[in-house]
Image (cartoon, rainbow, N blue to C red):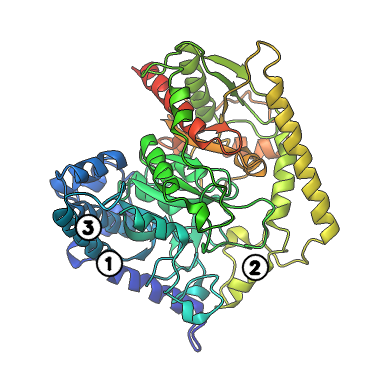
Amino acid sequence: MRVEGSSWEDQAAAKRESVLAKINPDWRLSPTELEHASHQRKFTGGYMEKFLESQDISIISLDSEELVTEIKNGKLSSLSVATAFCKTAAIAHQINNCLHEIFFEQALERAAYLDKYYAENGTTLGPLHGLPISLKDQFHVKGVDTTMGYVGWIGSNLGIKDPSQAHNIESEIAKELLSLGVVLYCKTSLPQTLLFGETKNNIIGETLNPHNRNLSCGGSSGGEGVLQALRGSSLGVGTDIGGSVRIPAAFNGIFSVKPTPERISYRDVANNNPGENTYRSTVGFLSTSLDGLGLMLKSVLSTSPWLRDPAVVPIPFRQDVVDTYLSRATPDGAARGNPLKLGVLWSDNVVGLHPPILRGLRMVADAVHKGGHKVIDWTPPPQQDAKRIHLAFLKADGAHDIHTQLDLSGEPLISDLRESFKLKPPMNLLEYQDLTLQGLEYEAKYSDYWNSTESEDGQIVDAVIMPVAPHAAVIPGKYYHTAYTEVLNLMNYSVVVIPVTKADKNIDVFDDDYKPLNEDDEQNWKAYDPEIYHGGPVGVQIVARKFEEEKVLAVAKIVCAALEKAKI
């Protein structure tokens, strides 16, 4: 909240220093090391590892399922795992501003408690016993700020109505994760407002892409994407209302799942304009592995969140759905019996794809086709219609909620958002209701189109492969077209993002003969620079329908297996 006599700039600076002060002195980088890091184009892999001990590297190199197995079998202690991830996260933050909150001391105390529990009981506390989990800075943890990138909420938790609740509130999913045995240790960076495909705010500045610092890490769960790319986390929790767990996953070369809203609890989670409930934000997960996403979904649903959050639909994890779809392919992704039928969206016919994205789509389509699965072109109702409707809901309050948070400290909108979120009168009720009907009509048309794919061969499309964005991890300030993700929020579809490749200046050359579709497409096309984009991660979305999380995870596993085989 506003500190009398203190400018927002001073409050932000003090917050940055307080976060850094929570890093173990032994994990602090020297001024020389920080200066050197500031000039690195890439700081994943070997660059990060030079700051770590061999034992740390061996631990953070493991993915989530491997970590919980090693802890369960007594080969790793919870404390050694938590220490390795806390140290790595500390280094990641120092070189790339990816954390809003650090609570390593609490994490190490928790890990020591879990080790004691294991020693005394001969068993684990839960299926995620000892696994460090990072959280986007929307989730409340006792004793910790939730600023959501707003200076005015430093020292408190955004969204609380009673000041006495500060640092005493806990998000429902945080409670569930603790009951499963996890170690919570940090909260990751996000953009001011949440409604931005990059990660910038007035507290920490800008979080860049660890694969190529000339590019953005995406948003709004950008800090999660960065931390995982740098192996400071193997599994984390984010949110998505327009692409916010999918964009950072694609831009940072990791995996994510966007469930249908109401599958996972959003109770007591900070949010932008929380009263906009027509197209809800959803809790989603990001991970360094596809299996990590399945582990998280299955574990969280095992707690029956619908009993504590009435908004959650009571659907337990359906292993039978996973098994049914996996039975349709061999372990290397080749069709077995009834092949998958997959649609591929090559363009939304508004903004075309940069060469790295088009190549990535072809790699996936060719791999599954070679594996014996059916592949068809996907030509749904115009996605621009969906974007127009969805964006109108995001701005329906005239940015009043955003300006309410800004006014707490007097901070301004960041420069990227000043035009988009000027204070305006809210949308009137009749217009809101009309847009609701337009949204429902679009959903019906899209569903009808999906069902129509059965007519040609008697088999309906199982899932759709489509771009996350028209570009790889984007040049900051040049993310011009978000319809590839927004359309799926309008329909509340279940989506997984998988990494495919990286932009390569020697392959993904600029096509001087390209004829832009319109002014927006021309703007996006002219922004492509093979040299700058070189090394930028490329991911794709795999899309199923509402509440088909288990199905889309299984299809993604088949697609990933086919892709890996094709790369050999």
Frontmost of labels 2 and 3 is 3
Looking at the rendered structure, the kind of residue marked 2 is: Asp
Measure how far apart labels 1 and 2 are at the Cα level: 33 Å
The residue that label 2 is drawn on is 401
Label 3, label 1: how far apart the Cα atoms are: 12 Å
Is 325 located above or below residue 40 in the figure? above
Mark 3 or mark 1: whose residue is earlier in sequence: 1
Query: Dot 3 lies on which element?
Result: helix
The residue labelled by disc 3 is 114
N-terminal-most mark, 1 or 2:
1
Q: Please identify the quarter of the rendering in which residue 294 is found.
A: top left
Looking at the image, which is closer to me, 7 or 424?
A: 424
Asked whether 6 or 495 is in front, the reply is 495
- Say which residue label 1 marks: 106
Q: Is residue 451 left or right of residue 70?
A: right
Task: Report whether residue 273 is seen.
Answer: yes
Q: Which SS class for mark 1?
A: helix
Mark-to-mark CA distance, 2 and 3: 41 Å
The amino acid at mark 3 is Leu
